[in-house]
Image (spheres, helix red, strand yellow):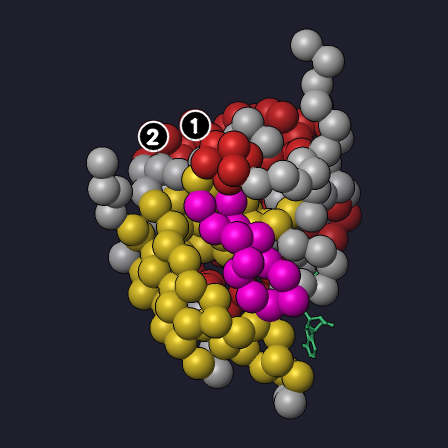
Amino acid sequence: VEIEAVLRVEDLAKRYGAKPVLAGCTFELYAGQVTALVGANGAGKTTLLTVLSGLLAPDGGTVVACGRVALVAQDRPLYDHLSARDMLRMARHLNLVWDEDRATRWLRRFHVPPNRLCGRLSTGQRTQVALAVALGRVPDVLLLDEPLANLDPLVRNEVMAELLTEAAETEMALLMSTHVVAELGGVADNLLVLTHGTITLAGQIDDLLANHRFYVGPRSAS
Ligand code: ATP
């Protein structure tokens, strides 16, 4: 079955000054599917996600998105002098499309104190606020830069489960970066491997695991 791509990236290139950081990146994202973006530190994951979000202009190639794209950036930028609740209120004013219920449900689900200033939240709680803001925008494509970093292992599973539910319910495409492949094992449909700024492996995770030998972390004992 052919699935329609919601984001199409072709021959994308990005330099910082003279230093090439991305080159020849070509891939697609699909509605309702989870794609893991895996690469070593410095491979260019953050740069790629930032370019896809539209916050950073590429030096070459094209990005075509069908619908809205939202990014949960690696540093979870928030207005630190606003409470978590006011952060959502602000987002409501800044976005033409905004699902208040969806955003506040996420904060409640992960027990973020709504009246605490964002600047006083833990790094894990900041991630939850950033996720709430991104989901409230009802994106067709959600870009997540190391979404599970700084979360407790138990909360990690809950966040992944909730994100999968949201993706399935709204046909949202998820692209999430990680340098721990095992983190997304059994979760992601597709895998993109970024090596020194170039996509060196792309496809359905099941196919890749069957046809390539690479280390994906310890297997569970069961
Ligand atoms: P990490 O897993 O450590 O976050 P990453 O895969 O996300 O790494 P990037 O943050 O995209 O990689 O960085 C890719 C390369 O570009 C690195 O060599 C980095 O030092 C460089 N780089 C990133 N941002 C800038 C910038 N603003 N100016 C110059 N070089 C940069």
Quickly name the residue at label 2. 169
* Ligand 1 within 8 angstroms of badge 2 C-beta: no
Q: The N terminus lies in which quarter of the figure?
A: top left
Residue at 60% from the left image edge and 25% from the top image edge:
158
Is residue 210 or residue 170 the one in the foreground?
210
Query: Image height check: is 198 above or below 19?
Result: above
Q: Residue at x 55, y 27 (%)?
A: 186
Quadrant for ligand 1 reads bottom right
> Residue 151 magenta-drawn?
no
Between 45 and 50, the residue placed more toward the observer is 45
Expressed as whole percent of the image width and height from the top left, the position of residue 14 reads 54, 78
According to the image, label 1 marks what residue? 165
Relative to 27, is 221 on the left or the right?
right
Residue 205 seen in this snapshot: no
Q: Nearer the viewer, residue 192 or 177?
A: 192
Q: Position of residue 167 (x, y in %)?
A: 40, 35
